[in-house]
Amino acid sequence: MRKRDLIGGALSSGGAAILFVLAARTRAPQRRFTGTSKTGSLDEALAKAIASAARSAGHPDALVSWRLDSVSGRSGGIAGFREVKVVIEASVD
C-alpha cells in the first residue's frame, strides 16, 4: 500500500484512520547492526548485535525491535576459526 493511498483513506475514514497514519509515519527507521562471536556462539553474536542497536539510541532505556536478517560464519582452517556473524534489522525507540 502506498503512502498516498493511506492518506486518502485516512481523510475519508475519519479520526481512527488518521491516528493510524500518524503513528505509521513516526515509527523509527530500520537500521542494520552486526554482532560477531569468535567462539561460534549464535547467542553471543545476536546479543552483541542487539546491544549495538541499543547503544545507538544514546540513552539507557532504549526499546529495540529487531528482525534477524542473516547468519554467516567461518569454521576450521589452519587458524581454527569458529566465527558466527549475525546481521539484524532494528528500529530503536
Image: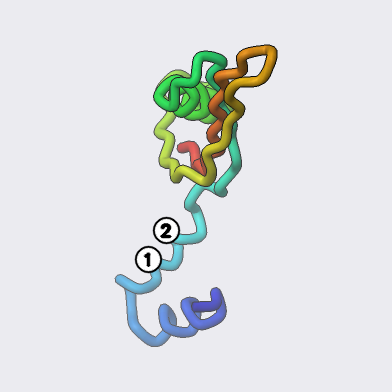
Q: Residue at x 61, y 18 (%)?
A: 81
Q: Which corner quadrant of the image does residue 22 belong to?
A: bottom left
x and y, in percent, of residue 76 in the image: 60, 21
Q: Residue at x 54, y 27 (%)?
A: 84
Q: Which mark is residue 20?
A: 1
Q: Residues within 10 Å of mark 1 (few under 14, many from 20)?
A: few
Q: Residue furthest front?
A: 78
- Residue sitting nearer the eye, 57 or 46: 46
Q: Which amino acid type is shown beneath numbered disc 1?
A: Phe
Label 1: element kind: helix
Q: Are marks 2 and 1 in contact (CB under 8 Å)?
A: yes
Examine the rendered structure and indicate whether residue 7 appears above or below residue 30: below
x and y, in percent, of residue 15 in the image: 33, 73
Q: Which mark is residue 23?
A: 2
Q: Residue furthest right?
A: 78
x and y, in percent, of residue 30 in the image: 55, 47
Q: Is residue 65 left or right of residue 56?
A: left
Examine the rendered structure and indicate whether residue 38 appears above or below residue 88: above
- Residue sitting nearer the eye, 55 or 9: 55
